[in-house]
Amino acid sequence: MIRWWISALQLTELFVSVVVHVVYGFYIFSSAVAGDLSQTLNEWVFKPNMNIVVKEDLRGTSKTTTNGDDLPPIVLVHGIFGFGKGKLGGLSYFAGAEKKDEKVLVPDLGSLTSIYDRARELFYYLKGGQVDYGEEHSKACGHSQFGRIYEQGHYPEWDEDHPIHFVGHSAGAQVVRVLQQMLADKAFKGYENTSENWVLSLTSLSGAFNGTTRTYLDGMQPEDGRTLKPICLLQILRLGVIIYDWLDIRLLKDYYNFGFDHFNMSWKKMGILGLFDCLLGNTGPFATGDWILPDLTIQGSMQLNCRLQTFPNTYYFNYATKRTRKIMGVTVPSSILGIHPLLFIRVLQMSQWSFPPDISPPYKGYRDEDWQENDGALNTISTTTLVSQSNNQAVTLQMILSVNPCNQESG
Ligand SMILES: *[C@@H]1O[C@H](CO)[C@@H](O)[C@H](O)[C@H]1NC(C)=O
Ligand SMILES: *[C@@H]1O[C@H](CO)[C@@H](O)[C@H](O)[C@H]1NC(C)=O
Ligand SMILES: *[C@@H]1O[C@H](CO)[C@@H](O)[C@H](O)[C@H]1NC(C)=O
């Protein structure tokens, strides 16, 4: 009887969670559409103004080409559920930073793709050419070796003498670290001269360096940090993503893309049988684990981290985030009224999380207490470790903010 009650409670929690997240997603999507529509309407109604706008634009570009040439670009790298310039209409993931200066680049790296795939994509976005995911990795993960073609790189001159400033939010910070390691390892065919010094600085905005317990709350198995629980929020997301990609509606995908095009999940490519295969969990990114959630568990991050170095010539800056505080030894959300209700629940859930006692913890010395402070998406501990690790190697700066500078929901 008690077991029955617990299952019923869990199902109710799941149901509420699904409804809240779907409503939130729909809200973002429809505000993007509404923003676009009103902009189009504006342009149409105020057509006479068009000339002035064009003139201003021209002036803007000539200005930056004359005096901005010697400055390195700043590349802003989004996190999970993020998107780059050109997606979701006029909406900006980085609060409009890319509209301030031509030197600010915001690549679109797919919203659910793995950290590895994002790092590969980012390289070709900057250098230009067809994305090469690498033969070995592609075979192991069951996707095409070659992906999207960037006819024109966004910074083709990128090299040791023309390095770049990177700013990574959440998983995006880890993407830059993986990319830097690939550059150091000379992991791009045809570019034998890459080195870690192509990265001038990495600024992390609540970087996901050690994973997050959020992943377990949403449905990753704490046993392995790789597979999904049979019934959970992420399972519903999985089904939704597969169907979205299978339907392959151009208009929608131009608007928002999960980034799995290299998995060939469109109905044109895998037919109805392929769809069932994918839904049953035999093929696709969720079957091979080549998507972002496994990279964001504590175990997944440890696997990534054991191959990552920090480098002496790169500047690392770290902004951590926290939405909790301690009251008489108990970690609780830092406020009730000043916080969005959805966020409040998420912060609360994470501050209460404990690793199931019947499972061996992800690493020696793991303590639940260390992981209780959080910002609703990431545990604060996970966003601070890069600096403590690279302290004496480069200039580092650390701040703990009580507000996430970026969009809170896109952990
Ligand atoms: C995906 O489709 C392309 C051509 O449309 C093909 O070259 C590639 O091998 C396919 N990849 C997989 C993993 O089936
Ligand atoms: C690679 O670097 C070497 C020396 O550092 C240089 O001679 C060579 O031209 C470079 N190759 C490319 C493709 O840039
Ligand atoms: C957390 O991440 C940092 C940076 O990659 C790493 O040095 C450290 O060992 C990690 N800690 C744990 C507990 O995995």
Image (spheres, rainbow, N blue to C red):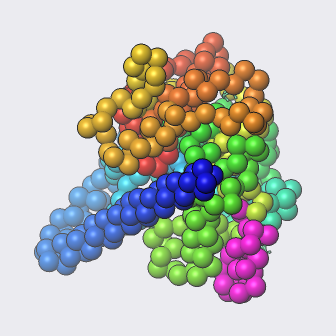
Relative placement, left or right, of 53 versus 156 is left
Q: Is residue 269 a member of the stretch shown in magenta?
A: yes
Count of numbered tags: 0
| Relative depth, front residue between 244 and 22 | 22
The x, y position of residue 306, in whole percent, is 77, 32
**Quadrant for ligand 1?**
bottom right
| Relative depth, front residue between 87 and 280 | 280
The x, y position of residue 277, in whole percent, is 76, 76
The x, y position of residue 336, in whole percent, is 30, 36
Q: Residue at x 57, y 23 (%)?
A: 369
The x, y position of residue 146, in whole percent, is 74, 66
Quarter of the figure with the N terminus: bottom right
Relative placement, left or right, of 148 versus 170 is right
Whether residue 110 appears in this view of the structure is no
Q: Residue at x 72, y 21 (%)?
A: 365
Q: Residue at x 57, y 70 (%)?
A: 240
Q: Which quarter of the figure has residue 35? A: bottom left
Relative placement, left or right, of 190 versus 67 is right
Predominant secondary structure in magenta? helix
Q: In the rendered image of this protein, does residue 213 appear above or below residue 389?
A: below
Q: Which residues are magenta?
A: 264-286
Whether residue 337 appears in this view of the structure is yes
Q: Is residue 212 a member of the stretch shown in magenta?
A: no
Q: Residue at x 27, y 37 (%)?
A: 338
| Relative depth, front residue between 177 and 345 | 345
Which residue is outermost to the top?
392
Q: In the rendered image of this protein, does residue 289 appear above or below residue 185?
A: below
Which residue is outermost to the front?
1
